[in-house]
Image (tube, rainbow, N blue to C red):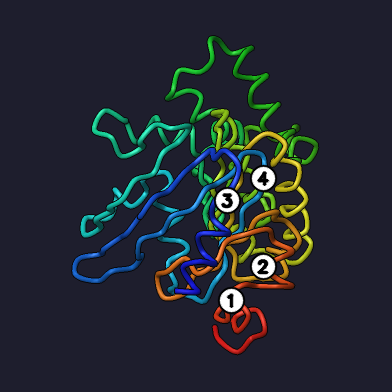
Amino acid sequence: MNDMRVLERTVVSEAAKIKAEGVSVHYGSTQALKEVSVDILDRMVTAFIGPSGCGKSTFLRCLNRMNDTVASARVTGRITLDGEDIYAREVDPVQLRARVGMVFQKPNPFPKPIYDNVAYGPRIHGLVRGKAEMDALVEASLRRAALWDEVKDRLTSPGTGLSGGQQQRLCIARAIATSPEVLLMDEPCSALDPIATAQVEELIDELRSEFAVVIVTHSMQQAARVSQKTAFFHLGNLVEYGETGQIFTNPGDPRTESYISGRIG
């Protein structure tokens, strides 16, 4: 009963950009996520932390319907973006993913020129008219991803030829080129060296002035550095959600305290 009071007290918050209510996920007969309810706030970084297999990436993939690509996945509950049910029959998942962009754990640029990596989304969504407008959008997206100065003289070179950190920033440029409202990041720094990680973390801090950003991370230090809100997942449950400083210094649930202190996980 005490756990429920903690959860109810910490999850209720300001107006949400994304609101999840009672979200559960099954893969076949296995339940991966259990009745998760949480608000994702605009222009803030929300970090999802917890042990491997606890459900944080599964929940992240619910927010732009990436679980639709898994045949055995079944999602129940309700998720709204600006009050609109994203699982409603009339919602096109492709259009949804233009509004809720995603950056994955391993940098995955297309085997295309740098320019075409960024132009791909705006092109398929019909967001620009003519080459001059596309040129301006590609440059703006690469600048926002802090990559323009490094690649402006080789836009026709393959994106796969960049370093790991540059590839991840290219993937961020690709994600933000469609002007999303939410940016999801699933362990975006786990394959990067410390210098590239610092660059991406600095970029995340800058991007939150424009988007709601949600990051899944195994690094509690990273969560503490980049996020304003933190949600702790354990065994498919959302255990606790609140201000990052409060979660790390004065958690309300003993499971959160055990994870942060290294006793579980």
CB contact under 8 Å: marks 3 and 2: no
Q: Which residue is mark 4?
A: 44
Q: Secondary structure at mark 1?
A: helix
The secondary structure type at the circle numbered 3 is strand
- Cβ atoms under marks 3 and 4 closer than 8 Å: no
Task: Give the label on residue 18, or none.
Answer: none
The residue type indicated by label 4 comes to Met
The kind of residue on which mark 2 rests is Ile
* Left or right position of 233 against 148: left
Quarter of the picture holding the N terminus: bottom left
Instruction: In the rendered view, tell whether residue 213 sits above or below residue 122.
Output: below
Q: Nearer the viewer, mark 3 or mark 4?
A: 4
Mark 2 or mark 4: name the one nearer the start of the chain: 4
Residue located beneath label 2 in the image? 247
Residue depicted at x 74% and y 64%: 245
Q: Are marks 1 and 2 in contact (CB under 8 Å)?
A: yes
Identify the mark nearer the N-term, 1 or 2: 2
Of label 3 and label 1, which has the lower sequence position?
3
Circle 4 — which element? loop
The residue tagged 3 is 214
